[in-house]
Image (cartoon, grey):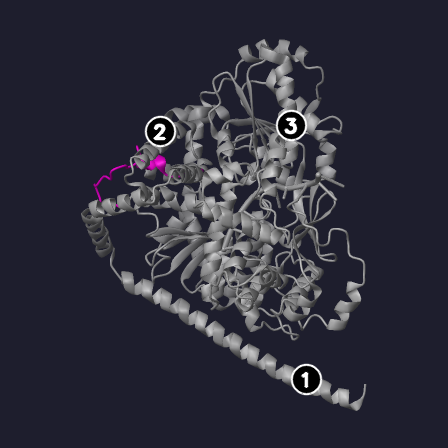
Amino acid sequence: MSKSSKRRYSSSSDSAEETRKKDLLERDEFATRLKKRDEEKVKKVAEASGKRSYEEAAKRLKMEAEDRDKILPKLRIQSRRKYLEKRKDDKVVELEADIADDEYLFDERILTKREKEDREHKKTILKLAKEHEKARELENVQRYHMPQDLGKGEKGDYVEVDDIEKLPHSEQKKWEQDQIRSAFFKFGAKDSQAQEEYELLLDEQIDFIQALQLEGNKEKKEEQEKSEYRKMRMTIEETKKSLPVYPFREPLIEAIRNYQILIVEGETGSGKTTQIPQYLHEAGFTADDKKIGCTQPRRVAAMSVAARVAQEMNVKLGNEVGYSIRFEDCTSDRTVIKYMTDGTLHREFLSEPDLASYSVMIIDEAHERTLHTDILFGLVKDITRFRPDLKLLISSATLDAEKFSKFFDDAPIFRIPGRRFPVDIYYTKAPEADYVDACVVSVLQIHATQPLGDILVFLTGQEEIETCVEMLQERTKKIGKKLKELIILPVYANLPSDMQAKIFDPTPEGARKVVLATNIAETSLTIDNIIYVIDPGFAKQNNFNSKTGMESLMVVPISKASANQRAGRAGRVAPGKCFRLYTAWAYKYELEENTTPEIQRINLGNAVLTLKALGINDLIHFDFLDPPPHETLVLALEQLYALGALNHHGELTKAGRRMAEFPTDPMLAKMLLASEKYKCSEEIVTIAAMLSVNSSIFYRPKDKIIHADTARKNFFHPKGDHLTLMNIYNQWAETEHSVQWCYENFVQYRSMKRARDVREQLASLMDRVEIEMISGVSDDTSIRKAITAELPRWVIYHELVFTSKEFMRQVTEIESKWLLEVAPHYYKSKELEDSTNKKMPKTVGKSSDTK
DNA sequence: GAGCACTGC
């Protein structure tokens, strides 16, 4: 190195040092501004409601109700006028879809009898809407299925037939109702005798052998006797006392007082999720304006549990008891019991790193080991060290408790029994080569030989399910009317909501329902009346290869824990049977004990950025329950450096601090920031929103593939998928977010609605990170330049996925010189020239998502 | 011409 160049090097390093210092200073200033903003917001909320006693609050509620009654007629006229001005049939349809979606949300725990009432109710609403009245306020009332905000003793115009019945149900209520129904099930000699002759109809059969029983702790007889009693209407108080957790109330409170961290081991149906926060509230843990927090892995769970607890405590949802999930914060300054999703708490850490407003934090369903729950373990463990007053409860199903206890410095384990019926487990004598075919045979075999009761089959994906549906339809048609009716229903996340809802329709008398489901039925959906489970033992799993940076979605054998969870689905209503399409030997020796936790399987870009923003610099030594692979962390850090979120010291830059505000992959966050420079923030926000609804925009049913694909071609943009996505969104927005439009174009309304929600959230976050929303100033090129910031390479792909082959999803063509413009710290011009000579892979520059 | 388990922010 020559002297002059050496000098130049050192001087440039000096200025780099200055830039770094300046950036860090700006970052801290930005962080201070954010904090101030948050504090002002909190202050405003507090001022608005003030510190009121309980009586005052009740009084105010009543006054509010009176006020509203006064202005209600006025509002009605206003809303009617507005409605007439902008009369669109779409609106009515949209309302219908909204209701359907909301119903779907809650239907999981809803009874068949109720569904009828629901449908009636929906019709009434639509009728009303069509009369051009109350449309607006109905929308508000119906949105969350909340009881109306009325004073005591008052009745609203369209109060639900039975307010209590309308509320989402907790596990416990479900249990109670299940008991009633189980009494009606027909298990009799008459059935099996009559069906013996059908066995001859089946040309093939699978030999199953019973190996063991998944133990239940309730005998059927005992429960059936009890069900007579249960049929009588129980008061809330009686119901609460009948829960398995109830006898443990005092010892549990005692244990929580004595120990800072407690592992609560309890099976489903023990009532722990709904009762423990109430016990703690009653025991005075919410004094001094402190809250009890409880995290759930799923949105629906957070909402429905909160609703149940509000009902039990006889308060309005959102006041003393509330929930907070993305897009929806249903809490107030009076909230003392707050249910939330684990991801929400993770985000909350950014504005309240010490959880100062909580006295107790409950991490529920810890055994599910979601990414957010795993990160929370490390964060809350850290906090308990400097906040001795914070109580921590880790609630989990059996088996994992010991592990949690060990992680949390040998915290004591508190065991609560659950309630479950026994499930007989059957294995095949020999391995099955084609498990889809084996499923079909097993279903027919059960249908022909076993007493009535619905069947749940676990398959791996949409295609498999569609094949299986076809095969079953064909076979049952051949057999004809000799067998009882078999209702075949598919369910997977990408299936439109109205079709999903069909699995909740009651099975007609004398018929049998068979539900073909993905893993969605393992935890997310609970279907009534399932007596038989068929488990081929496979699932699709996402895996991230940090060496290639590629994600893969492949069919893998499930774990023992997962197999037992599936079997348990048969024992909710009555004693059940689970048919495993693998051998007992395979179960014992080939299946893993537990599914690899998510944190070890996925790209950690966003997680690492959030942790950095929380001031955790040494991620390699962060206290993980199960640490992610070293390479994954390194790759995430490298990627953040490439995006300019970290400087070469590994410190968070100002850009990084801003990026951390977005609940997206860091690549997308960078793209959003870059839109400022290229004056296309509106467009980029749309694209980011569309990208984050992850490729479930198109609905592609097997029988209408051609139609669906033609419809898709209409949106094609020659410059790439990102712009195509923007086209789709804009066209949809132009139709005023029409449902009809979605149907016509084979676009999933649910996904589009979600994109709209995400878009709104991103837009407000843009304001938060001080970026103006600009549109229409720029052309395709600047939009594509901004996209380039997403990932400074030659083609921009949003995802790299290995399924049957390597796929780039969402591809946009870019020019190599833009890389230099966007990421000068990462690319040198020489490097680019060299590599442009190299032969590109075939897919480069081609659009993979829209052909 | 190919394909996309499930969540969550």
Residue A829 placement: quadrant = bottom right
- Please state which of residues A183 and A700 is positioned toward the viewer in this rendering: A700
Q: CA distance from mark 3 to mark 1?
A: 65 Å
Of the image marks 3 and 2, the number of the one nearer the N terminus: 2
Q: Position of residue A827 (x, y in %)?
A: 71, 70
Three-letter code for the amino acid on which mark 3 is drawn: Cys
* Residue of label 1: A12
Residue closest to the eye, A186 or A350: A350
Which comes sooner in the sequence, label 3 or label 1?
1
* Point 61% across, 38% down: residue: A710
Three-letter code, disc 1: Ser
Give the residue at mark 2: A120
Q: Residues within 10 Å of mark 2 (few under 14, many from 20)?
A: few
> Residue A112 is drawn in which quadrant?
top left
Visible residue check, residue A147? no
Amino acid type of the residue tagged 2 in the rendering: Glu
Q: Which residues are magenta?
A: A150-171
Q: Residue at x 60, y 56 (%)?
A: A406
Q: The disc numbered 3 marks a residue on which chain?
A: A
Q: Which residue is mark 3?
A: A468
Question: Is A462 positioned to the left or the right of A766 in the image?
Answer: right
Q: Nearer the viewer, mark 3 or mark 1?
A: 1
Is A100 in the magenta? no
